[in-house]
Image (tube, rainbow, N blue to C red):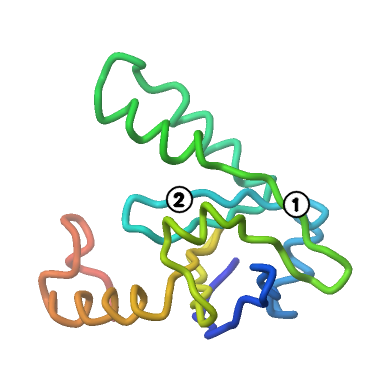
């Protein structure tokens, strides 16, 4: 279970050092292999390789004639890259993915349960402002009774 947000830095080669608290889980779930792809909100998604098939298969199974499904396939599947933790616990974030997500040196790794989001500093701050501005409207239908 990946939770919490961590401010991190990309190195000059575009590598992200995964915090040690997550490395064991990534190594045990998929021998350190991950899929990095693009989210429509211009952040990156990082899935342990073992978690990726359930997402991939659902997206690939969508209609090839329905415009939104095709756009989602092009984004999630077409830009997906398999990477692996190196000996220092880093993963490479490809230049084209860094450009799409507007990642510079400082980034935010945000746990989402079975995967992570990787945000630019500015993008993450904007997301937080939008979340707080939503206030009570933040809860989606069916979650109104969430015991917070």
**Of residues 63 and 1, the one drawn nearer to the viewer in this rendering:** 63
Where 130 sits versus 56, above or below?
below
Instruction: Answer above or below: position of 82 versus 28.
Output: above
Instruction: Name the residue at 50% across, 35% down.
Output: 77
Query: Can you tell which quarter of the image residue 32 is in?
Result: bottom right
From this view, report whether residue 80 is shown above or below residue 6.
Answer: above
Foreground: 20 or 119? 119
Could you say whether the residue bearing mark 2 is in a helix, strand or loop? Answer: strand
Picture quadrant where residue 133 is located:
bottom left
Residue at position x 55%, y 37% in the image: 54
Horizontal side of 25 relative to 131 (left or right) equals right
Identify the residue under disc 1.
Answer: 33
Compared across the picture, whether 103 is left or right of 137 comes to right
Residue 27: % across, % down: 80, 61
Which quarter of the rendered picture does the C terminus lie within? bottom left
Percent position of residue 23, x then y: 75, 70
Instruction: Tell whether label 2 touches label 1 (CB within 8 Å).
Output: no
Numbered mark located on residue 38 in the image: 2
Q: Is residue 49 left or right of residue 79?
A: right
- Measured in 3D between alpha carbons, the distance from the residue under mark 1 to the one under mark 2, in whole angstroms, is 17 Å
| Label 1 vs label 2, nearer the camera | 2
Task: Farthest residue to the right: give it.
Answer: 87
Could you tell me residue 89's position as x and y percent? 79, 71
């Amino acid at each position: 279970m990946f939770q919490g947000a961590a401010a991190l830095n990309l190195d000059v080669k575009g590598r992200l050092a995964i915090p040690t608290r997550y490395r064991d889980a990534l190594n045990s779930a998929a021998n350190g292999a991950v899929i990095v792809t693009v989210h429509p909100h211009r952040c990156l998604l990082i899935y342990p390789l073992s978690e990726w098939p359930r997402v991939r298969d659902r997206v690939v199974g969508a209609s090839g004639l329905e415009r939104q499904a095709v756009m989602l396939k092009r984004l999630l599947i077409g830009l997906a890259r398999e990477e692996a933790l190196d000996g220092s616990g880093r993963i490479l974030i490809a230049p084209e993915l860094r450009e799409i997500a507007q990642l510079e040196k400082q980034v935010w790794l945000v746990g989402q349960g079975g995967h992570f989001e990787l945000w630019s500093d500015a993008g993450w701050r904007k997301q937080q402002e939008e979340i707080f501005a939503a206030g009570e409207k933040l809860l989606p239908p069916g979650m109104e009774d969430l015991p917070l």
